[in-house]
Image (cartoon, helix red, strand yellow):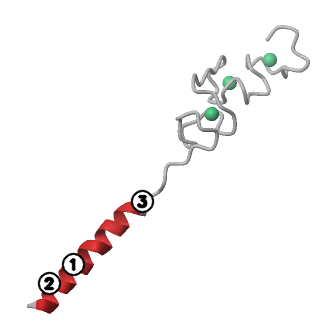
Amino acid sequence: MKNILTVFIFSLLFLLSCKNNTTPVTDSDKDAIENSKDNCSAIYNPDQKDLDADGIGDLCDPDIDGDGINNEIDNCK
Ligand SMILES: [Ca+2]
Ligand SMILES: [Ca+2]
Ligand SMILES: [Ca+2]
């Protein structure tokens, strides 16, 4: 009886430890949007603004307006 109880307790502890080992939510830039959903995972941008709706946040997008002309040389972003 004591052995069964011991096995039960260890099984329970194992299950609880597995629960804690589920994929941790990572948010590199601490903007409260996890990396997998963040359109600019390395830069803090909680508003997730994306002018051209290409899935790349404005702060990371080399071509903010999506007209094919990069920001540095675009005279109308
Ligand atoms: Ca971000
Ligand atoms: Ca964009
Ligand atoms: Ca542009």
* Residue that carries the numbered disc 1 in the rendered image: 9
Give the image quarter of residue 50. Answer: top right
Q: Which is more toward the observer, 12 or 58?
A: 12
Comparing marks 3 and 2, which lies closer to the viewer?
A: 2
Q: Looking at numbered disc 1 in the image, what kind of residue is underneath it?
A: Ile
Task: Identify the element where label 1 is drawn.
Answer: helix
Q: Looking at numbered disc 3 in the image, what kind of residue is underneath it?
A: Thr
Tag shown at residue 22: 3
Task: Identify the element where label 3 is drawn.
Answer: loop
Q: Which residue is drawn at 65% across and 16% down?
A: 51
| Residue 2, x across and y down, in percent | 12, 90
Q: CA separation, marks 3 and 2?
A: 27 Å
Q: With 61 as the anchor, is 8 left or right in this view?
A: left
- For this orientation, the residue located farthest to the right is 73
Q: Which residue is drawn at 8% across and 91% down?
A: 1
| Residue 53, x across and y down, in percent | 62, 22
Q: Which is more toward the observer, 77 or 9?
A: 9
Which tag, 3 or 2, sits closer to the chain's start?
2
